[in-house]
Image (cartoon, rainbow, N blue to C red):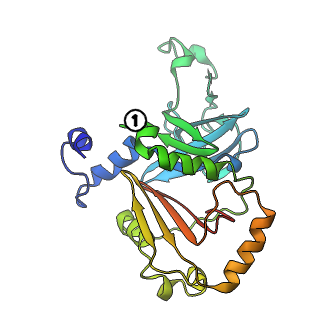
Amino acid sequence: NNKLFKYFGHSFFEPENELKDKALVLSFWHCVGHEVDLVSDDSYMMISFFDIEIIVHNYRGKLWAFENCCPHRGSKFFKDSNSKSKISCPYHGWTFTPYSSFIPRKDTFPEINSVKDVRPKIWELKMISGFIFISFKPIFSLEDQLGKEVISIIKSIGTSLKKNFSTQSIEFKSNWKIAIENSLEPYHVSFVHKDSLASLGIDDGDNKLYNWASILKHTISAKRIKKSNKFLKKMLKINYDFEGYWSLYLFPFSMISSTEATTFA
């Protein structure tokens, strides 16, 4: 992509250049969750990109995103990956909202003309039907990165989601590109996921490619699964219906997957 080439000065797919990984973090939009994860006032979740921690926080119904680092002395606001709290630094009590900043004993900092200018490092945040996207300095608009067709699909899915049933965190050491490649190829499923995904009896599937996204669709052969999903669909209000196993990859780090549109991960 010529625009990216000019932005980075070279191809960013060369594995030996770690700076390119951080460039991907800072310059692309990332789908990091859905608003059903943050329904309560002062609820938050933490997203980690390599050595960068981002907090997405609900302040009186407004979601905002910022780095987990106080601008005063660099202390972290939070250690937990999700909880409920106001944004107040545990070190010196500097406190922030999307609209204001509070500095205890402000008179001891004569070099600060206005506390409004003292802010954590803010990230841009946009919503698509409940899905949360963040970026620090995007080189594309969210609409240009995703494209109309993918946005239409995300909107349909987003309005179907009403509750988060579980949150899981699994950590393992690998090059992130290998992890993504693994999740995009179905060849390993019958050997590695015998008790889960393989039980669906999926085929190799068809992959539809977009500029910065792809959709992989698999046919399900397991009659038991198809029968149970048919029953579930009668109970659910589904705005984006499909048959089989389906996975939407959003470059560079995010995926949304589902079996028969009954639940999404």
Q: Residue furthest right?
A: 235
Residue at (56%, 84%) from the top-left corner? 201
Residue 177 screen position, x and y as percent: 35, 64
Amino acid carrying mark 1 in the image: Lys
Where 72 sits versus 202, above or below? above
10 Å crowding of disc 1: few (<14), some (14-19), many (20+): some
Residue at (24%, 42%) from the top-left corner? 8
The number of discs equals 1
Regarding residue 77, the answer to whether it shows in the image is no
Q: Nearer the viewer, residue 176 or 51?
A: 176
Residue at (28%, 49%) from the top-left corner? 19
Residue 221 screen position, x and y as percent: 58, 84
Residue 26 screen position, x and y as percent: 39, 42
Regarding residue 52, the answer to whether it shows in the image is yes
Q: Nearer the viewer, residue 193 or 227?
A: 227
> In the displayed structure, does residue 134 sit left or right of residue 20?
right
Quadrant in the picture for residue 169: bottom right
* Rendered-image quadrant of the C terminus: bottom right
Residue 132 screen position, x and y as percent: 58, 44
Q: Nearer the viewer, residue 82 or 160?
A: 160
Quadrant in the picture for residue 224: bottom right
Residue at (63%, 53%) from the top-left corner? 157
> In the displayed structure, does residue 215 sit left or right of residue 165?
left
Where 4 sits versus 169, above or below? above
Provide the secondary structure element on which disc 1 rests: loop
Q: Which residue is mark 1?
A: 137
